[in-house]
Image: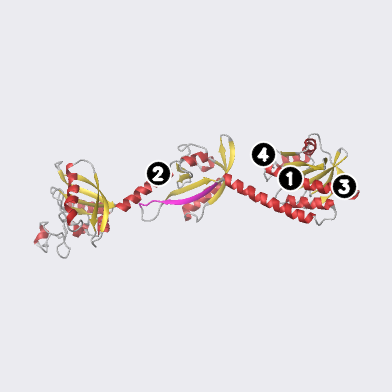
Amino acid sequence: MGASRSSGTTDALGPDEEPDEPGQADGQGGPGGPDGQGASSVPLDSGAGAGSGADSGAELLAALLDGMDAALCAFDAGGTVTHWNREAERILGWSAQEAVGRKGFAGWAVRRADAHEVQGRLMAAMDAPGRQVHEFALLRKDGSRVLVRTQSARVLGAGGKPAGVYCAFSEVHAQIDLERAIALSEALLEDVSWGVVLVDVDLRPTVVNAYAARALGGSRTGLLGRPLGELVVQGVEELEAALAHVLAEGAPGAPAEFWVTLRTAEGERRRCWRSGFLRLASPLTEEPVPLGVGWMFRDVTARKLAQQEADRLRFRTGQLHRAARTVSECEDPMEAATSLLDFALAGFADHVLLDLMEGERLVRTAATPADAPGPCLLVAGGSIPVRYGPGHPALQAVERTGSVRTSAGAGVGAGDPEGAAAWAAERRWPRDAAHALSTVLRSRGRTLGVLTFLRAPNRTAFERPDTAYAETVAARVAGAVDLARAVGPGAGE
């Protein structure tokens, strides 16, 4: 076995050359003499083969040792350094020519005061099976000290007897950094407070931690290798586009938020995930080869919904404030009512209908255009009675003295536009109406009529917070209508 460096193998001197000093030929003295040149290796097994086969084996061994990420040196049974690779040279600064052939570490790689203990602990591996781990303070060539962690084990010769020791070592801080990296990766893939998914280049999960498995609605093993489209009903295109971008261009500078709809045993549920991405590249290649994407996310649905609700409430409060200022300048109370409805419509609904009670009938008094967006206007040419059938939401609101919400039904609208149009026409509403909210107009203990808000199929159905807002608007409209009837018959009759 030759030295780890091809320049320091057993053939370093050449077949016809003589050593510069006698001590170099027989391995006595320093490995390189005063000028540090001409170091030769000391084989662990003197029975190694000769000729071209031995030469090629030494070259192969040197290449393998120099390509290692860990520093490595070896000693023969007498404690003489026989091998020294490039990583050992990088850490300590001593080249193979300077190290190979030296007797132990004393005086050059270890302080003389520590040399006996260090050498004894290293060579003790010859008498014990397996590996032994130690930490030593070694000396660099520039005189500084470095703390290393070593793993040493015996080397058996051809006869099965210990022929020496090999020692692999690395800087303690580098070893600790590696252990921390491993511990961090293991901790991230356990049950932490955010989801971690490792995705391969085909955008399929390869590792899923417990949080992510719960969020995706499956088990940690059951999700592996499955396309994301099988787990995410809506929003998967945006998510896969982000993953593909990270693979091609690298991680974005800031987290991104994705709204997705998941398919679960309880049905579909909509969630918001705040996500960060990392491109994973192999550390074993000179050029970074992408291994996939590390996707980390947290479910922020509750926070986003609360934020949206706060923004919506802030906007609606602002609209009511602006409406109140505008209404205060209206001389005609019915003009005030329609102006208030114009402000209320913004961001809330697509259409509004104002039906007032005349006797036992509801009469259409004001409405937005049925075929296009526009302001709420009084019906021209007088009030028109509406032909609502039994069970109509507006009639139910009058009977209950409250509010009624209704929708065209699941699938009607986006999947069945004709069905949605028929549903709206049957209720005497504009053809693009798919969601309705009817609330009663009450003032001074009397029912004055019904206010109906309508939304198109591309919008969500009315919810409880919408009902509260509609009732606030209805109370203000009812006051204006009551005033119109009190001051004269022209406006509200």
How many angstroms separate mark 4 from mark 2 (CA)?
45 Å
Residue placed most toward the observer, 214 or 112: 112
Q: Secondary structure at mark 4?
A: loop
Q: Nearer the viewer, mark 3 or mark 4?
A: 3
Horizontal side, residue 410 vs residue 232: left or right: right
Any mark on residue 186, and which?
2
Residue 395 in the image, given as x and y percentages of width and height = 80, 37
| Residue type indicated by callout 4 | Gly
- Tell me: 75 left or right of 417: left
State which tag comes first along the sequence, 3 or 2. Answer: 2
Residue 374 rendering spot, x and y as whole percentages: 77, 52
Residue 405 included in the magenta stretch of the image: no
> What element does badge 3 sit on?
helix
Q: Which residue is mark 1?
A: 470
Looking at this view, name the residue that lies furthest to the left: 22
- Crowding near the residue tagged with mark 3, few <14, some 14–19, many ≥20 C-alpha atoms within 10 Å: some
Q: Which residue is mark 4?
A: 411
For the residue labelled by badge 2, is the local secondary structure a helix, a strand or a loop?
Answer: helix
Q: CA distance from mark 3 to mark 2?
A: 75 Å
What segment carries the magenta color?
273-284
Residue corresponding to mark 3: 485
Q: Three-letter amino acid code at disc 1? A: Ala
Is residue 461 something one can see in this rendering?
A: no
Quarter holding residue 401: top right
- In primary-sequence order, the first of circles 4 and 2 is 2
